[in-house]
Amino acid sequence: INASGRSSEFTIYDAKYYAPAFGKKIIAAPGIESGTKQLLYQSAYRDFIIDNKFTSVRNMFLISIDGSEFVNKGNVSFEVVADEGEPFTCFIDVMLVPANLILECYISQSGLNIDELPTAREQFMLSGEE
């Protein structure tokens, strides 16, 4: 929570074990049950988000890949059933993340600070504007 009064974002990350294939069709991707569960997480934190005056909420699926770059694959929208207005969201961003980096964080018991990853941060911001 940002004590200086600047905008603050509440982000819900959900790591997935899927290995989706993106082409004409998307194969082995998170399904409707994963999407609705992700939005239920947002609902579970509703009072906390309001009480702490978060200015935005972001939902994100993290899917590990063999590579070294964070890749924004787009988002899924549940506007019809989950449009609660600001600061809440009805979008779930899909971000591919380097498995080696995540494994290093796990082994060293360290966190991954998104502010230290400007390329990924730019992609996160772009995905929220689509």
Image: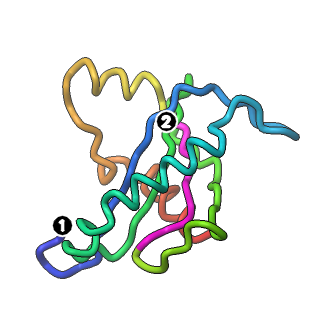
Label 1 amino acid? Ile
Look at the numbered disc 1 and give the secondary structure of its residue: loop
Instruction: Assess whether mark 1 and mark 2 are in contact (beta carbons under 8 angstroms).
Output: no
Residue 105 vertical position relative to residue 47 in the rendered view, above or below: above
**Residue sitting at x 17%, y 71%:** 2
Numbered mark located on residue 1 in the image: 1
Q: Which color scheme does this rendered protein use? A: rainbow
In the image: residue 75, left or right of residue 2? right
Q: Nearer the viewer, residue 95 or 90?
A: 90
Residue 26 vertical position relative to residue 45 in the rendered view, above or below: above
In the image: residue 102, left or right of residue 130? left
Q: Residue 55 sits in which quadrant?
A: bottom left
Residues drawn in magenta = 88-96
Q: Position of residue 34 (x, y in %)?
A: 56, 42
**In the rendered image, which residue does mark 2 sit on?**
97
Q: Position of residue 75 (x, y in %)?
A: 62, 55
Look at the numbered disc 2 and give the secondary structure of its residue: strand
Residue 43 vertical position relative to residue 51 in the rendered view, above or below: above
Q: Nearer the viewer, residue 92 or 37?
A: 37
Residue 26 vertical position relative to residue 46 in the rendered view, above or below: above
User: Residue lying farthest left?
Assistant: 3
| Disc nearest the viewer among 2 and 1 | 1
Residue 93 part of the magenta segment: yes
**Residue sitting at x 56%, y 22%:** 66
Label 2 amino acid? Val
In the image: residue 43, left or right of residue 64? left
Q: Main secondary structure of the magenta part?
A: strand
Q: Position of residue 20 (x, y in %)?
A: 68, 30
Which quadrant does the N terminus fall into?
A: bottom left
**Residue sitting at x 48%, y 56%:** 39
Circle 2 Cα neighbour tier, 10 Å, few/some/many (<14 / 14–19 / ≥20): many
